[in-house]
Amino acid sequence: MRITTVDGHLLIGDPRLPLRVLLLHDAGATALSMLPLARALPAGCAAVAFELDGRGELADAPPVRCFDDAVKRLLPAFRSWGDRPAVVVGHGVGALLAHALVAALPHGQGHHIRDVVLAGSRSPATTARLASHPRAPFLTRTREELAAELRRDGGCPAELFDYPHLLDYAVTMLGRDLHLLDTYREPAAPPPGGGTDYHVWSGRGDGSLSPAELERWRLSTPSPPKPRDFAGGHGFLCQERPPAAALHELVAGRLAEGAGVPPRPQRGAA
């Protein structure tokens, strides 16, 4: 599978294929973390893993000031790659970005989005309620607290903690990304009837996501989301095989439909 970089984001596969899978990674991670999902996709689609600022070719980009700035910075690339039938997948903060980016699409382009998978994230309503809107990163959480969080999460290689400069880099990325949650404002949901299916996925070991919390996603999606849980904790999406198999099945179903969008009646037609 060919992997290239386009404007700082990862393109996996042939972009001429009729279906796209658009991937947004979790806080503190990179676009590379989405490769296990991309490699498990069926033939017939290409994937784009979007990179948040501060990583790879985007390392020198000015840090975004808040969640809305992150959406504005990602939106041009998201619109460009969402020019055909697509499945959108976001993990953690990436789920909230995916939700906001889909909501920000022009009406004429939103119908391309066939499915949105929102994984490992609190609902928009809860995230907005908890957001304290600090002026800058590291005011809500200290660097020491973030380093401790990386140790607790279990998703980092043990070697990371043996090299202070690598640990400092990881803490910096995590702090900047969590600042997006701290400055979150819920976007208006797209109107009902857009033809997009929403899915809320979670790890059964993620203590921050109760069934009631996952149910709150219904308040922010234009159609009731389909819930599904998996083994694992917060990092379940890219650390366990069943989610990759479930995404493969979902995308294969869209390909079996012809990767197309059902024809819509012309305005004014009976």
Image: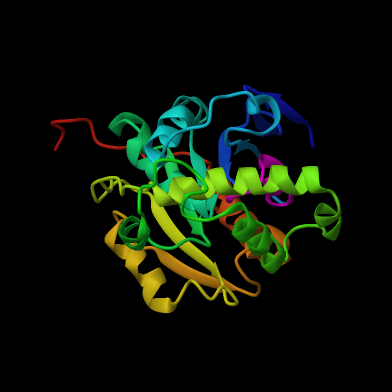
**Spot occupied by residue 82 in the image (x, y as percentages of width and height):** 48, 32
Residue drawn at point x = 48 percent, y = 56 percent: 118
State the residue at coordinates (49%, 55%): 117
Query: Is residue 230 positioned above or below 79 on the image?
Result: below
Viewer-closest of 269 and 42 = 42
**Is 32 included in the stretch rendered in magenta?**
yes
Report the quarter where the N terminus lies: top right
Residue 93: % across, % down:
50, 51
Q: Residue at x 30, y 45 (%)?
A: 187
In screen coordinates, is 133 left or right of 29?
left
- Residue 214 position, x and y percent, is 41, 70
**Image quadrant assignment for residue 72:** top left
User: Does any portion of residue 124 appear in the rendered image?
Assistant: yes
Vertical placement of 212 versus 28: above or below? below
Q: Is residue 42 visible?
A: no
> Residue 264, relative to residue 234: is it above or below?
above
137, 237: nearer the viewer: 137
What stretch of residues is rendered in magenta?
26-37
In this picture, residue 127 sits left or right of residue 120: left
Look at the image and say whether residue 266 sits in the magenta stretch.
no
